[in-house]
Each structure stands twice: as C-alpha cells, then as structure tokens.
Image (spheres, rainbow, N blue to C red):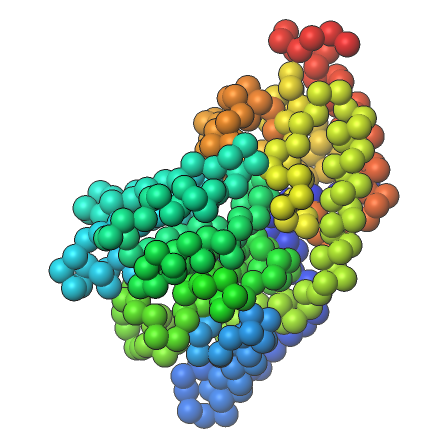
Amino acid sequence: MEVYLDHAATTPIHPEVLVAMQPYFTEQFGNASSLHKWGREARKAVDLAREQIADKLNIMCREVIFTSGGTEANNWAIKGVAFTREASGLKGHIITQKTEHDCVLNACKWLESRGFAVTYLDVDEFGMVNPEDLKSAIRPETFLVTIMHANNEIGTVQPLKEIGQVIKTANPAILFHTDACQSFTKEPLNLKDLNLDLITINSHKIYGPKGVGALVVKQGTKLVPLLHGGGHEFGHRSGTINVHGIMGFGKAVSLASPEKNRHMQTLRDHLIKRVLAEIPGALLNGHPTQRLVNNTNFSFPGVEGEALLLRLDAHGIAASTGSACSSNTLEASHTMMAIGRKPELAHASIRMSLGWENTLEQMDYVVEVLKDEVKQLRSMSATWRRE
Ligand SMILES: Cc1ncc(COP(=O)(O)O)c(C=O)c1O
C-alpha cells in the first residue's frame, strides 16, 4: 500500500486543477498585460482566480497580490514594511516568535543585520504564543508584528484574534502580518475579525501548483515593492504574470471545503488516538486541540526519526522529520527546541500530515507499520529501556 502523509511539505495537484491550468500552457498562452484576444483571455483567467481567493477570504480583489509563493510573500511583507519605515528615515522594532518558518526568521535576522531590532517571543510547551508576552514586548518604535497562523511542523494554531486585539489596542499603527501557508482554507481566516493587515498564502499546500502564492495587502497599507519593473499587480509586484499557476491556485481554492477539512480531522484524530494508545511512550508534539486539521507530529523516545522515516518509506509511507526545508540538516528542529523538547526527543520525532485522498484504512495500516518498526528500532537502541 502507498500512503502519502507529507501534505504539509506539498500536495499533489488535483486533477481538476490540472484541467483548469492546461489551456494556459497551450492555446491560451497570452500575456495577461497584452491587449489582444490572447492577452484578454489570460487576464480573464487571472481575474477569476483573484476573485476565487478574495471570496474565500471575504476581501476585495485588489487586496490579493500574486507572488511566486509563500517565501516571497513573507519576505515582501516583512522587508516591504521595514523599507517603507526606513524610507521615512527611521529603523524600529519588529516582533515575531520562535517557531516561525525559516523564511520569516531569516528575513527578520537579515533586517537585524541592517539595524532593525527584532524580538523573538517564546512559546509554551504546545507552541502557543502568550498574548500577554506580546503586550509586554511592544515598544513605542514597534511597527510590525508577524506571527504565523498555524505551524508547519507541529500544527499549533495561534490565537490570532487575541494577538490582533493586543496589537491594535496598544497602537493601531502597528501592522499585523500572518503567514497562513499551512492554514489557508483549513482554518477560518478573516482580515477584519483578526485585525490583520497582511496575510501570506500559497497554492502548493492545497492541491494547486508550486511556485504560486499571494500576499493579501489590506487596502491602504503602505508597502514598498521588492520587485521593480513594469508595475504589474497594481504596481505592487512587477513581472510577467504566471497565468497558468494563478489559474491553478484559484481552482484549488474553489475545491477546498469544510467537508474535506472534516474528513482530514477524522483521520487525524483516529491516528493520534491509536498511536498514543498503542505505542508505549509515544508523545504528541503540538497542541492537543488548537491544531491544524491535517497535522500529527509524534516523538518516539528511543527511536531516531530519520531511521524511522526510511523504514516507513520502505513500506510505501511518506512522512517527514521537521519541516521539508530543514529535513536535510542534522540540527534539531528550532520548533522542537522552542517547545522545550530535549534534542534526543526532537530527533525522535516524525510529522505525518494528511490530505483529502487519505483513508481510514491507510491510517490503520500506518499504525500497524509504526508499531512494528518502533519496536524493532528500540530493540537496537542502547538508550531505550527494555520493555
Ligand atoms: C508556514 C510556511 N510558510 C512559508 C512556506 C514557504 O512557502 P513556499 O514553499 O510557497 O515558498 C511554507 C512552505 O514550505 C510554510 O509551511
């Protein structure tokens, strides 16, 4: 049996997404900026996708600015706001937290090297930011808070509503950005209710193509562009528009549904329940309830996560250790360290992230394989207590 459980790294392209994209590779190949028929057809496709995304988020079409993905959108949100501030002769202070995706953390570190101050908030053992800590960290010169919606490794969903209230009560001029790459279409997300100014989303976590994303920019938000050129995307982001990718992104968004989310959640709960009940010493990483509908992440003391991953692979099961971006380094995941897991427990962790096509039968197969492989690996471990 083949079981793909790495949807947090990327999903397959849904067949209906592929069908929607195909004409824009061939007969409808036009440049969306051209005035002729081919150009107009391409523009129509981009307009439709923008509308599908805007509808999902209950925002205006003009607030959706397409990018090459989540990494670009996060970099643009953070550097764009910082450069806007710098343009008025000021540096200032940014607040983020320790379990952000590397593209957020490294953009912040780079800004630190250019004279900006950054606070990296601690999280609790479940990966949650405490809004009170945020309140204490806000300074008169704070101009941006960037806190992810849901974590890519442990699935913890942050209390964005409380965080938004703390920020805007302290100082309405502070901009609030969230990286919603993992949560988009899976968790309710509303610019107004959450006091957000900027939201990063992408396509390849939701059955769309890779290399496409968007930054949602609330109307009136001042943001210096990172890419200068012909003034595409309402002057925000230049470059010939990725028509087929954007078309696929829009279609993928239109296919997401509460039923599909409920399906993933049922599988998630089944997997968590069986693993914790049937594998001695298994620990769940992340929040027990405030977690993404498709995320599971376990530590199996006495087991090397990489070794387990390879054994699962041999049984046709795809999982991951840490995030896809950091899984080829030997360092313990920064997220596991931030939630206080000891390095040996961090290295003993695997993430299994679910998708629309997974089944209950697959979950049962995975549990049986896990039980067996964890037992075998522990029998070879010098540190694991003998059962
Ligand atoms: C939380 C989070 N942010 C950002 C990214 C980067 O997105 P992209 O792969 O579209 O650049 C990812 C995906 O790897 C992610 O999980």
Q: Residue at x 49, y 89 (%)?
A: 40
> As rendered, which of 196 and 57 lies closer to the eye?
196
Position in image of residue 22 (x %, y %): 62, 73
* Residue 218 in the image: above or below residue 312: below
* Residue 165 in the image: above or below residue 24: above
Q: Of all residues shown, which one is farthest toward the bottom? A: 36
Position in image of residue 114 (x %, y %): 20, 47
Position in image of residue 79 (x %, y %): 30, 56
Asked if one can make out residue 163 in the rendered structure from this viewpoint, the answer is yes
> As rendered, which of 103 and 316 lies closer to the eye?
103
Of the 4 image quadrants, the one containing the C terminus is top right
Q: Residue at x 84, y 37 (%)?
A: 364
Q: Which of the 4 quarters of the picture holds residue 56?
A: bottom right
Q: In this rendering, would 272 be left or right of 251?
A: right
Of the 4 image quadrants, the one containing the N terminus is top right
* Residue 204 in the image: above or below residue 138: below
Q: Of all residues shown, which one is farthest toward the left? A: 89
Asked if one can make out residue 65 in the rendered structure from this viewpoint, the answer is no
Q: Which of the 4 quarters of the picture holds residue 15?
A: bottom right
Position in image of residue 284 (x %, y %): 66, 32
Q: In this rendering, would 110 be left or right of 31?
A: left
Q: Residue at x 74, y 59 (%)?
A: 260
